Image (cartoon, grey):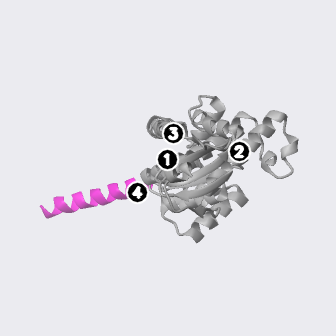
Amino acid sequence: MTAVHGATKEQTETKTRGETQLAPPWHVIVHDDPVTLMTYVTKVFMQVFGYPQDKAQRLMLEVHKTGRSIVWTGAREQAEMYAQKLQAHHLLTSLEVADA
Amino acid sequence: MWYARVTEGTVFGGLQAPVLETLKGVPMLLESSDARVRERLLPETCDDPEDEAQWRRHAVPELERLFLSRAQLVRRDLAGVRKLANFDAHVLLVPTGHEAAWLGSLNAARLALFALNDLRAEHLEPEGFRKGTEKQQHAVLRIHLLAEIQSVLLGDVEIDDLDGSFEDFILE
């Protein structure tokens, strides 16, 4: 019993490690566009991510100055949810695997 | 154009015919099936074709529904535009609770105008206006007009707080 239990635990740990390797984090990226107001972008970042105003403003300026900014990184499902919310406000948003 | 806050929301007044026409175009732009507009409002999101196909299957239909419902709400508010008795101008009320739908729709309309008129970033700069054709210049003016309304709804512009309802205000 003990030996079988040990083997099962080992298999589970191996499987979990394997799954973790197969699920890298995803970046949510916002790209600059010349139309959308800067204050609107800041407000959307605050609303969607709950970021404080200074962080939202810093990210907005990064988008504006460099053309894009990684605004969030994490699990794919949540990244997709955030991307959808940002696109609902018409921010130019894309998704990228973090280690790509 | 002037703005004020009343009990029910935000009032935009002094709206002349060209401004009204621009506002009435907002829901239509949101509903546009033009490929350039759709490409911008529902952009390619993932590099991997399989991921992109999944995004198109799941996320895009929800976004389309959201845009349509916003367009309907904006259209309803626009149907309530009133003409002031002694002035040759109209008044629009954006009710409290409708601001998010308006902000999103105004942004979408500005992006659509930009795409439909082949505008470039330079056209929106102070000196860039003259670089456009007549049609492009009209589009730029509309983009700036809609931005002004967005700024008011975002709270970027200080506006008068009138102590009364929209109806009281209309009757005065």
Q: Does the magenta stretch include residue A47?
A: no
Q: What residue type is labelled 1?
A: Gln
Image location (x, y in percent) of residue B37: 63, 35
Q: In front: mark 3 or mark 1?
A: 3
Are callouts 4 and 3 both on one chain?
no
Q: Do the residues labelled 1 and 2 touch (CB within 8 Å)?
A: no
Quarter of the image with the N terminus of chain A is: bottom left
Residues drawn in magenta: A1-21
Distance CA(mark 4)–CA(mark 3): 36 Å
Q: Mark 2 points at which residue?
A: B143
The residue positioned 67% from the left and 62% from the top of the image is: A62
Q: Is mark 1 on a helix, strand or loop?
A: helix
Q: Which amino acid does label 3 sit on?
A: Phe
The residue positioned 58% from the left and 55% from the top of the image is: B153
Query: Quadrant of residue B34 in the image?
Result: top right
Q: In front: mark 2 or mark 3?
A: 2
Q: Name the residue under label 1.
A: A84
Circle 3 residues within 10 Å: few <14, some 14–19, many ≥20 = many
Circle 4 residues within 10 Å: few <14, some 14–19, many ≥20 = few
> Which residue is more in the foreground, A1 or B157?
B157
Q: Are marks 4 and 3 in contact (CB under 8 Å)?
A: no
